[in-house]
Amino acid sequence: EVQLVESGGDLVQPGGSLRLSCATSGFTFSDSWMSWVRQAPGKGLQWVANIKHDGSEKYYVDSVEDRFTISRDNTKKSLYLQMNSLRAEDTAVYYCARFRGQGWFDSWGQGTLVTVSS
Amino acid sequence: DIVMTQSPDSLAVSLGERATINCKSSQSVLYSSNSKNYLAWYQQKPGQPPKLLIYWASTRESGVPDRFSGSGSGTDFTLTISSLQAEDVAVYYCQQYYGTRFTFGQGTKLEIK
């Protein structure tokens, strides 16, 4: 069974930093593209970033480019999101998702809440 | 970026009746080299992560009931629930994966009339 478990969400002040983690099991992590998708409270879904199975390609939504960094450790079967210069509009539940085929998300974690507020 | 627009924003349908949700992309998501539409549909119930229903615009994910179907091509797509069940109450999202930056529609909230 595919499992994705996010952690690291917290309350942080504007301008602060946070690192999210996603521990995975039940599939060959090193063969899979992975993604982060976020959802602001009461709002819709927003794709945040993708990373290729070997980490050689990374893509970001414009609003987080230069502030967020997606990374992975295939030996630990884990995905990460380093978030710097956080803004109030980054407040959301952040989901780790497995990317299949050309870009649909077939497995999701339960999410971790990031709140940016003073 | 490709903008995805769903309609309606909310929908109320009687049990057993058909529900139809539309999704329009700001540019075609049909890839000419393989004739595939790079579009997926998801269902999200309160307090839960999204669940994949359909990819390639019309291919049902394993385990998804056959009352769910997807259709359309190019820029206009439809998710149809042929006979609404109580457990189908949720928010539905379309998503394009054409290229390297993905976008979702704003969501359609489906309720029972």
Image (cartoon, coloured by chain):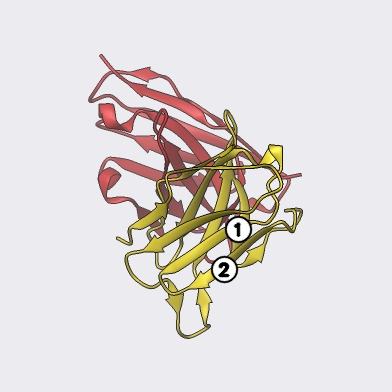
Can you tell which mark lies on residue B71?
A: 2
Res. A95 in view? yes
Q: Residue furthest bottom?
A: B33
Which residue corresponds to the image point at 75% horizontal and 54% vertical from the top-left? B65
| Residue A75: x %, y % from top left | 61, 46
Q: Work out whether A45 lies above or below A32.
A: above
Taking A26 as reference, is B62 above or below it?
below
Mark linked to residue B80: 1
Name the quadrant of the C terminus of chain B.
Answer: top right
Q: Quadrant of residue A118?
A: top left
Position of the N terminus of chain B by quadrant = bottom left
Q: Choose between B47 and B7: the one closer to the eye.
A: B7
Which element type, helix, strand or loop, lies under badge 2? strand
Question: Would residue A99 be found to the left or right of residue B27 on screen?
Answer: right
Report the chain shown in red: A
Residue in the image at 27% along x and 50% along y: A62
Q: Are marks 2 and 1 in contact (CB under 8 Å)?
A: yes
- Numbered disc total: 2
Discs 2 and 1 lie in a common subunit: yes
The answer, for residue B56, to whether it is visible in the render is: no
Judge from the rendering whether residue A79 lies leftward or rightward of residue B59; answer left or right.
Answer: left
Residue A80 at what x, y percent from top left?
47, 39
Three-letter residue code for mark 1 = Thr
**Element type where label 1 sits in the image:** strand
